[in-house]
Image (cartoon, rainbow, N blue to C red):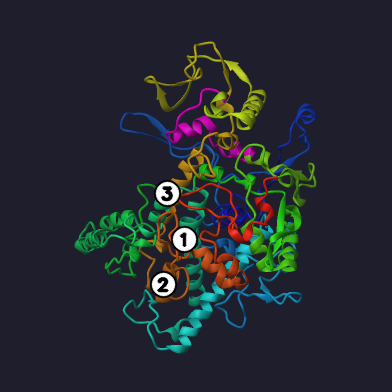
């Protein structure tokens, strides 16, 4: 469950089409079903939702390519991302002037985030929102943070962990400054780049921003090297995602490292300097541009030099709507959380409805049970499978105050996922796949795996029958061209999808994208997600590192300080710590999220000592070489989570 709430924590950092938790409240759309369908499917006819905020919907300009073919310069309708798309910790620190008003800094040390002591437990947490803060009525009594919408106890736990981490870095920096006040901290002022900056001369505001850079880079590293390889649990993804962060050559090959360094050194001062650095970034990836030992002397006074490691691959960085679509992962969340006490980790003390830890209730839920108990709860419980028919009930009946009039006052999030994709112009599943170069489906029967038997086969057949019932069939026309994204037998795709003209075919072209990838029956070894999702994930996972100068040419002591670069590279203070045993054939460092949790929630140290990846259920014994067996480690055999009943 830590992995499920992590991805909600990430999407709060990356994108939001809403402004301060609302869409276009001047327009409300019907998003329920008809009266006839209500009796048939059990849905609500009265559901309404505020329409999406549209950025552009006028006629787009056009242009022609070299062959005279005409194209649109943009989609017919576009929606703005009102959050910062970078890995910048904006869910904690804010992303615009309004959200910044909710960020509290410690008046006793302005470089720190404010944490206040809870009277009952004595633990320190983020403070509550005040009446003077900008907020929706739904957010009242929640914690004060940059992005408080759709707040849960899982988001609360993670936000508090990283607020503590921010302060941990500030405290370590203050300690070093007290010990060596006149020493060079590595920071540089772009207006005087050759002047050393002593530890004692770093201002509160500068240290706050340095800590934000460090925390944001840690979050990016955790997602790249820890969360993603756990959700996509096999060797190619382990190598690929670690290559994204540490570079394709990693830290193993002295020869290749030297070659890459020479690429930059040889091209220094050359007109192709930027191109040389872009090639370097391709091999080095992410933080590897400095981590691999680049000796290139950057000039922090010029934009060209500051951005020398950035590589946009010919297209300005953005999050396409398709990226948002594949992150509609609500099936990961259950209806009940299995609350545990860190003093008795094998016992489920209470089953807590997630809806009772939502919005304002998240504040008391976290404080009444404490960070250690919630950390153990989220770390031990398995998340939900990303398959059809697994959306939690509370998300199908979610009350929203702004929907009391008009409408039912509730919303079905599973239905809303489909409606927003349609509203945003996301292609339906078959065309979505074609545009990413994946194979087209020709009927709903393609969702039945050839190897499926028993209960698995019965489940797949059930969903295929439901798709056919809901989306229907029609008599096809071979003369109707439906897509130019691919060709079949030398011709563009037609309505018959390879069937004879006039044949009855499934309306597979109408299938909503989210329904399609949830229904995909075959997935690579260890994958929690589908093939369709993977293609979109993997493109953006790389691009958002390559395109961010603070994770390429700007990942250096002049911005992060020497301590900050080491902190990110070593997953915390001091030298890098290594796990005592090999994992799936690799010698690995203690992972960033594991070290961070042990540092900021010390009560979890004993439990985490047995854990390699914090997003793997903590009591699980993985065995060797990417085993998918669900077996307890020796001290967790009594845990009811492993019961076969």
Q: CA–CA distance between discs 1 and 3?
A: 18 Å
Res 156 seen here: no
Which residue in the structure is indicated by mark 1?
A: 221
Local crowd at mark 2 within 10 Å, few (<14), some, or many (≥20)? many
Q: Circle 1 sits in a helix, a strand or a loop, which is it?
A: helix
Q: Earlier in the sequence, mark 2 or mark 1?
A: 1
Which residue in the structure is indicated by mark 2?
A: 566
Determine which quarter of the picture holds residue 429. top right
Mark 2–mark 1 contact, CB under 8 Å?
no
On whether residue 415 falls in the magenta region, the answer is: no
- Rendering coords of residue 418 (x, y %): 63, 37
Q: Is residue 162 above or below residue 84?
A: below
> Could you tell me which residue is drawn at 49 percent across and 57 percent down?
226
Quarter of the figure with the C terminus: top right
The boundaries of the magenta stretch are 418-444
Depth check, front residue: 499 or 416: 499
Quarter of the figure with the N terminus: bottom right
Q: CA–CA distance between discs 3 and 2?
A: 27 Å
- Rendering coords of residue 185 (x, y %): 40, 80
Which residue in the structure is indicated by mark 3?
A: 235
Q: Earlier in the sequence, mark 1 or mark 3?
A: 1
Q: Earlier in the sequence, mark 3 or mark 2?
A: 3
Determine which quarter of the picture holds residue 63. top left
Mark 1–mark 3 contact, CB under 8 Å?
no
Q: Is residue 527 above or below residue 340?
A: above
On whether residue 431 falls in the magenta region, the answer is: yes
Q: Circle 3 sits in a helix, a strand or a loop, which is it?
A: helix
Res 630 seen here: yes
**Which-is-in-front pick, marks 1 and 3?**
3
């Amino acid at each position: 469950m830590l992995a499920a709430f992590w991805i909600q924590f990430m999407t709060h950092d990356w994108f939001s089409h809403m402004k301060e938790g609302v869409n276009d409240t001047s327009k409300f759309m019907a998003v329920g079903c008809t009266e006839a369908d209500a009796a048939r499917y059990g849905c609500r006819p009265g559901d309404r939702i505020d329409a999406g905020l549209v950025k552009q919907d006028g006629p787009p300009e056009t242009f022609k390519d070299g062959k005279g073919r005409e194209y649109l310069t943009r989609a017919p309708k576009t929606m703005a991302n009102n959050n910062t798309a970078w890995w910048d910790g904006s869910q904690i620190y804010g992303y615009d002037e309004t959200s910044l008003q909710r960020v509290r800094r410690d008046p006793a040390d302005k470089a720190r985030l404010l944490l206040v002591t809870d009277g009952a437990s004595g633990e320190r947490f983020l403070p509550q929102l005040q009446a003077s803060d900008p907020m929706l009525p739904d957010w009242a009594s929640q914690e004060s943070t940059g992005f408080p919408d759709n707040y849960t106890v899982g988001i609360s736990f993670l936000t508090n962990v990283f607020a503590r981490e921010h302060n941990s870095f500030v405290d370590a920096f203050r300690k070093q400054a007290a010990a060596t006040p006149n020493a060079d901290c590595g920071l540089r002022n772009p207006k005087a780049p050759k002047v050393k900056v002593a530890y004692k001369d770093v201002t509160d505001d500068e240290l706050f921003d340095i800590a934000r850079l460090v925390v944001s880079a840690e979050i990016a590293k955790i997602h790249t090297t820890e969360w993603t390889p756990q959700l996509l649990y096999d060797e190619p993804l382990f190598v690929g995602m670690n290559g994204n962060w540490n570079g394709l050559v990693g830290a193993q090959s002295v020869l290749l490292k030297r070659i890459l360094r020479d690429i930059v050194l040889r091209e220094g001062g050359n007109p192709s300097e930027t191109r040389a650095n872009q090639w370097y970034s391709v091999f080095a990836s992410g933080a590897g541009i400095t981590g691999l030992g680049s000796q290139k002397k950057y000039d922090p006074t010029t934009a060209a030099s500051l951005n020398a490691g950035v590589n946009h691959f010919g297209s300005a960085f953005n999050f396409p709507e398709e990226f948002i679509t594949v992150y509609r992962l609500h099936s990961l969340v259950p209806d009940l959380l299995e609350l545990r006490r860190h003093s008795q980790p094998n016992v489920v003390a209470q089953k807590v409805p997630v809806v009772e830890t939502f919005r304002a209730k998240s504040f008391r839920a976290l404080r009444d049970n404490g960070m250690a108990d919630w950390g153990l709860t989220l770390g031990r419980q398995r998340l939900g499978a990303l398959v059809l028919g697994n959306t939690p009930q509370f998300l199908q009946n979610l009350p929203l105050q702004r929907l009391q009039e008009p409408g039912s006052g509730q919303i079905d999030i599973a239905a809303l996922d489909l409606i927003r994709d349609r509203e945003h112009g996301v292609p339906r599943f078959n065309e979505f796949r074609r545009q990413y170069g994946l194979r087209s489906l020709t009927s709903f029967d393609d969702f039945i795996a050839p190897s499926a038997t028993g209960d698995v086969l019965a489940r797949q057949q059930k969903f295929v029958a439901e798709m056919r019932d809901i989306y229907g069939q029609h008599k096809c026309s071979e003369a109707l061209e439906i897509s130019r994204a691919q060709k079949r037998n030398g011709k563009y795709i037609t309505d018959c999808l390879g069937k004879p003209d006039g044949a009855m075919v499934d309306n597979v072209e109408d299938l909503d994208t989210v329904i399609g990838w949830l229904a995909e029956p075959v997935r690579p070894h260890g994958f929690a997600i589908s093939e369709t999702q993977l293609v979109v994930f993997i493109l953006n996972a790389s691009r958002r590192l390559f395109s961010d100068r603070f994770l390429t040419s700007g990942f250096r002591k002049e911005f992060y300080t020497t301590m900050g670069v080491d902190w990110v590279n070593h997953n915390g203070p001091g030298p890098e710590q290594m796990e005592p045993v090999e994992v799936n054939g690799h010698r690995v460092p203690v992972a960033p999220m594991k070290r961070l949790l042990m540092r900021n929630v010390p009560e979890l140290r004993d439990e985490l000592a047995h854990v390699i990846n914090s997003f793997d259920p903590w009591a699980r014994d993985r065995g060797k070489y990417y085993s998918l067996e669900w077996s307890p480690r020796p001290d967790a055999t009594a845990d009811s989570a492993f019961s076969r009943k």
